Amino acid sequence: TSMDDLFSGRAFRGGGQELRLEAMPGTQFQRYAATFREPFLFDSRYGLTTSGYYYNRSFAEYNEDRYGGRATIDYRFADSPIWRASFATRLEGVNVKDVPFWASPAITDDAGQSTVLGLRAGLNRDTRDSYLLPTSGSVIDVGVEQVLGDYQFPIGTAEYSGFFTLYQRKDGSGKHVLAARSQVAVAGGNAPVFERFYAGGFRSLRGFTFRGVGPYENNLN
């Protein structure tokens, strides 16, 4: 209503929407993504998150190109807003390339272009005091996904993140926060190599190389 609204931060506050744009161009590998979230779709308890992405990644065994989109509809329960149910779908094109000729059939059988369609139902409990910089609370997320397309297999995941303030000044500033995270995931036996879970490396089993925990054939995962 006035310039004072603009400079004081009262203008253009929005309704909690989130927009994330990511661009990482490169000569060998690159990554691009765009994500938009509307937490209260049509002023209801439903939320909508959509995203599109394209990226390359390199593994010891092969290189991968992946592009696609994802849409998620979630519902926040009226009697307990910390609980949220969701349904998500993803449609992706995956290209497994640069596979060495001595690679295991577990890798060569999945080389080339593939289409992945995933349908996931999940349940989430979020008690964090802040979405971006939490200092207390936790997040529990469990879900089951059925993958269709060129491969058919289920995926089950369970994740926990907890945040604990160990120290803060009397005025509430200078907080020291401990974060604890854990994840359990399982994929069906028909899952291709680019959808399997491997442990090792950062945020996994420390002391092992990235994707270093798993079956080996011909010195390759």
Image (tube, rainbow, N blue to C red):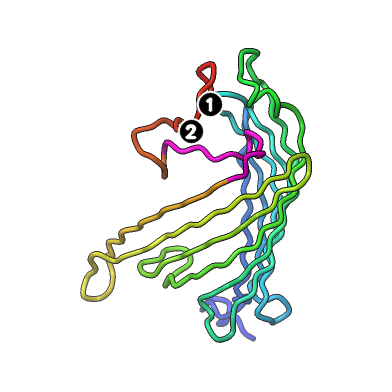
| Residues under numbered marks 2 and 1 in contact, where contact means CB atoms less than 8 Å apart | yes
Residue position marked by numbered label 1 in the rendering: 221
* Range of residues picked out in magenta: 187-201
Marks 2/1: CA–CA distance: 8 Å
**Where residue 211 appears, x then y in whole percent?**
48, 33
Q: Chief secondary structure of the magenta span?
A: loop
Residue 100 vs 65, above or below: the answer is above
For residue 115, the mark is none
Magenta region includes residue 16: no
N-terminal of the two: label 2 or label 1? 2
* Position in image of residue 187 (x %, y %): 59, 45
- According to the picture, the residue beneath numbered tag 2 turns out to be 211
Between 65 and 113, the residue placed more toward the observer is 113
Q: Secondary structure at mark 1?
A: loop
Q: Is residue 13 left or right of residue 151?
A: left
**Quadrant of res 188:** top right
At 61% from the left edge and 13% from the top edge, which residue is drawn? 102
Residue shown at the point (21%, 75%) measured from the top left? 170
